């Protein structure tokens, strides 16, 4: 609707059409993206609502907006409804400089660790396009396909799958140590005696004994309590008489437990790559996009 000095004709049209209320997107100060849902100052109205080179205070801006909405109600019979998105904070908000803890980070949201790893990979890859002989300026869908194919190789080299799975070797050592120390737990779940490796794995999954699934806070954070694992393998594989053999059996169980974990990683990676592809297409190639120009580290 432009500056508030231009709103009167819109009020008149709304009344003529029989409306009794106008719904506004957030009117607070927008951030550098200029999206009304990305707020730089939650306590100020957007300066673009006022005359050019507006230098008034926040209170003066509030007064102008309230006066206009009062006019809409009294002269045109229009009530006002607006979105308030206090938690939609723009990245260039001054408030964030004083409260960085309000933003997402691996400190306050540790499950974002693999996402940060992917972000780092994107930044490094973007800075290396020229040296790799890859296009920095997107001119076609084929350019995007090429970049995504090469970035997928970079992403796989970072072993993001490690955030999803059990570390088999560590699991084997932990179970062997538990068996040697005699510190085995109690198993109160379904009978595992004589069960196969795959059956034992399925029983553990159904019993919810995999800890920190989808925690993603660090690599190989998914685990099973060693004492519990020790008693399970002793019961399931009673024909094995030494700790090393039992630990190896537990390693095979972990291999089966990891199958679904690897599948989840593959599916998440596909979603991430699809999102990156779509973002590159919109920001660099689409006619209705911002066409940001050459890709760089920044």
Image: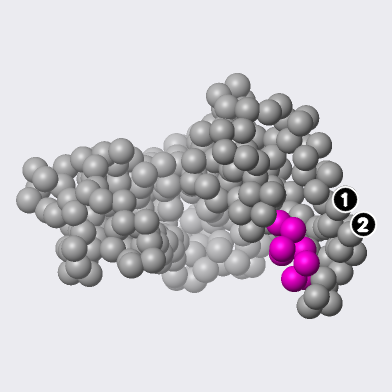
User: Which span of residues is magenta-colored?
Assistant: 7-14
Secondary structure at badge 2 equals: helix
Residue at image location 33% in from the left, 67% down from the top: 287
In the figure, 90 relative to 248: above or below?
A: above
Query: In this view of the protein, can residue 253 be seen by the observer?
Result: no
Image vertical order of residue 35 relative to residue 180, above or below: below
Residue on which the image places disc 1: 70
Q: Is residue 232 magenta?
A: no
Instruction: State the residue in front, 177 or 126.
Output: 126
Residue 63 on image: x %, y %: 81, 37
Q: What is the quadrant of residue 171 in the picture?
A: top left
What SS does tag 1 mark? helix
Q: What label does residue 74 carry, if any? A: 2
Q: CA distance from mark 2 to mark 1?
A: 6 Å
Left or right, residue 193 beside residue 3: left
Q: Are marks 2 and 1 in contact (CB under 8 Å)?
A: yes
Q: Is residue 247 above or below residue 29?
A: below
Q: Looking at the picture, how far across and down is residue 123, in whole percent? A: 29, 41
Dividing the image into 4 quarters, which one contains the C terminus?
top left
Residue drawn at 90 percent across, 64 percent down: 77
């Amino acid at each position: 609707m432009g500056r508030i000095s231009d709103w009167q004709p819109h009020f008149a049209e709304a009344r003529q059409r029989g409306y009794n209320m106008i719904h506004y997107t957030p009117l607070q100060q927008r951030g550098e993206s200029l999206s009304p849902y990305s707020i730089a100052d939650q306590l100020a109205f957007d300066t673009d609502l006022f005359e050019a080179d507006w230098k008034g205070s926040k209170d003066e801006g509030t007064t102008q907006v309230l006066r206009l909405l009062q006019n809409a109600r009294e002269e045109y019979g229009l009530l006002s409804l607006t979105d308030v998105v206090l938690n939609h904070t723009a990245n260039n908000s001054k408030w964030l400089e004083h409260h960085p803890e309000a933003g997402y980070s691996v400190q306050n949201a540790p499950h974002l660790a693999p996402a940060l790893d992917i972000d780092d990979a994107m930044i490094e890859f973007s800075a290396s396009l020229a040296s790799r002989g890859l296009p920095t300026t997107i001119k076609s869908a084929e350019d995007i396909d090429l970049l995504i194919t090469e970035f997928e190789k970079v992403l796989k080299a970072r072993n993001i799958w490690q955030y999803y799975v059990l570390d088999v070797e560590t699991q084997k050592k932990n179970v062997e140590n538990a068996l040697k120390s005699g510190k085995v737990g109690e198993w109160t779940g379904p009978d595992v005696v004589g069960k196969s490796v795959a059956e034992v794995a399925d029983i553990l999954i159904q019993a919810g004994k995999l800890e920190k699934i989808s925690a993603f806070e660090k690599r190989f954070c998914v685990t099973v309590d060693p004492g519990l694992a020790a008693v399970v393998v002793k019961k399931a594989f009673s024909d094995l008489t030494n700790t090393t053999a039992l630990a190896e059996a537990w390693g095979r169980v972990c291999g089966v437990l990891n199958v679904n974990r690897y599948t989840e990683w593959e599916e998440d990676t596909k979603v991430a790559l699809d999102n990156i592809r779509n973002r590159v297409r919109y920001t660099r190639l689409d006619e209705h996009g911002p066409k940001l120009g050459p890709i760089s580290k920044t």
